[in-house]
Image: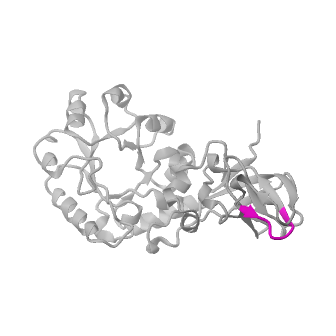
Amino acid sequence: MTVAPLRLRLDGTALTDNWRMLAAMSGRAACGAAVKADGYGLGAGAVASRLAAAGCRDFFVATWAEAEALAPLGLPVSVLHGLRAEDMAVAQAGIGRPVLNTLVQVARWRAMGGGRCDVMIDTGMNRLGLSAEEALSGALDGIEIDTVMSHLACADEDVPMNAAQLEAFGVLTGRVAARRFSLANSAGIALGADYAFDLTRPGLALYGGVPRPELADLRQVVTPEAQVLQRRRVRAGATIGYNATYTAQVDTEVAIINIGYADGYFRGFSGVGCARFDKVALPVLGRVSMDLVAIAVNDAPFLAEGDWVSLDYALPIAATVSGMSQYELLTGLGARLDRLWSPNAG
C-alpha cells in the first residue's frame, strides 16, 4: 500500500461533539447534516457513519451520484439539486429523496408515481426553489412531502434579510402540507429558536467552521500534514520560489514540504501561512506552488527529511490569513491527501 507524503488528520470526536453542540442549540428541532461535496472534502462516508452513530438521522447531498456513494450505509438522504430527467432511474431505486425545486420537477416526480419527497421554497435567495406562489398554487396537492425547506442567504450577518426570510417561510407552515419544515443552516442555528422549526441542516459548522461568533466553541476537525522532502540552507541574498518573492535577509534553514495549491493549500497562504513541528512555528516563505511549499526551520534544528509537519488550519483564522472562505478551505482539500481518522470508527 502506497503511503502518501501528505495527509489529513481528522478528529472524529470533534466532529461528533460539534454535531451534539449544534443539536443542543437546535432545541426541539432535529439536527441533520449536510455531507455534500464528499463531506465538505473530508469523506462523506466516513463523516456520515460517525454522525449516524452519534444520533443524526437526516443527511443532505447535492447530487444523485453523491447519494449513490452513501447508499451502502442505508441512511436517509435528501438530494438538494432535485430531479433531472437523467436522474429518474436512480431516483426510482429509492436511495434518497429528491428535493423538488421547480414545477417541472414536481410534475416529473408525480409522473413517476411520486412517493415521499422534499420541497425547496425560495424565500429571497433567488437560487433554487419554488416561489411561494407556486407552492400555494395547488401544484403540490397530493404529493407526499416529508420536509419543506428554504435557505438563508445572510445568516452569518445581522441584517434585515434574515427576519424577512423567516417571516416569508413562517407563512408557509400553515399552508403547505408537509411533515416537517426546515430553514436554519449552520449560521441560522445561532440566530435563535425561531429559525429552527422542525429540522436544522448544519454543514460548515460540523467541520469546525465558525460562521458566527456564537459558534466559537466549535472544535477543529481537520489538520493537513505534509512530509519534508528536502532540508537546505539558503544564503543571505538568495531568493526562494516562483517569481523570487522572498529574499533571505540572513542565512536561513529551509524545508521543502510536499503540499501545494493542487492539494487545496492555496496561494493565499504564500508568505503568510504557517507550519508547526513540535509546536514550533515555521513560517511559509515565498509563493505556494502547485505541489511544494517552503518553510523556515531555523527554530527546528532536528527537523529532517522524511519528518512530518502540520499546517495551521483553524478555519476562521486560516480564512482570514489566506483570503479564502472557510468553505473553500474545506472543499478544496485534494484527493492526494490520505484521510486518517482518529479514533477509527468501531
In the picture provided, is 3 more to the left or to the right than 251?
A: left
Q: Position of residue 182 (x, y in %)?
A: 30, 56
Q: Which residues are magenta?
A: 246-253
Colouring scheme, one of rainbow, by chain, secondary structure, one colour: one colour
Which residue appears farthest toward the top when viewing the image? 89
In the picture provided, is 302 more to the left or to the right than 62?
A: right
Q: Quadrant of the N terminus?
A: top right
Which residue is pictured at 28% across the width and 54% down the height? 150
Which residue is pictured at 42% across the width and 50% down the height? 57
Residue 118 falls inside the magenta stretch: no
Q: Quadrant of residue 238?
A: bottom right
Q: Quadrant of residue 194?
A: bottom left
In the picture provided, is 163 more to the left or to the right than 187?
A: left
Task: Choose between 27 and 109: the one closer to the eye.
Answer: 109
Q: Position of residue 159 (x, y in %)?
A: 30, 71
Q: Position of residue 125 (x, y in %)?
A: 28, 56
Whether residue 208 can be seen here? yes
In the picture provided, is 76 more to the left or to the right than 105?
A: right
Task: Choose between 235 and 204: the one closer to the eye.
Answer: 235
Residue 251 falls inside the magenta stretch: yes
User: Image height check: is 152 above or below 157?
Assistant: above
Whether residue 48 can be seen here? no
Q: Position of residue 162 (x, y in %)?
A: 28, 67
Q: Quadrant of residue 197?
A: bottom left
Which residue appears farthest toward the left when viewing the image? 137
Count of labels shown? 0
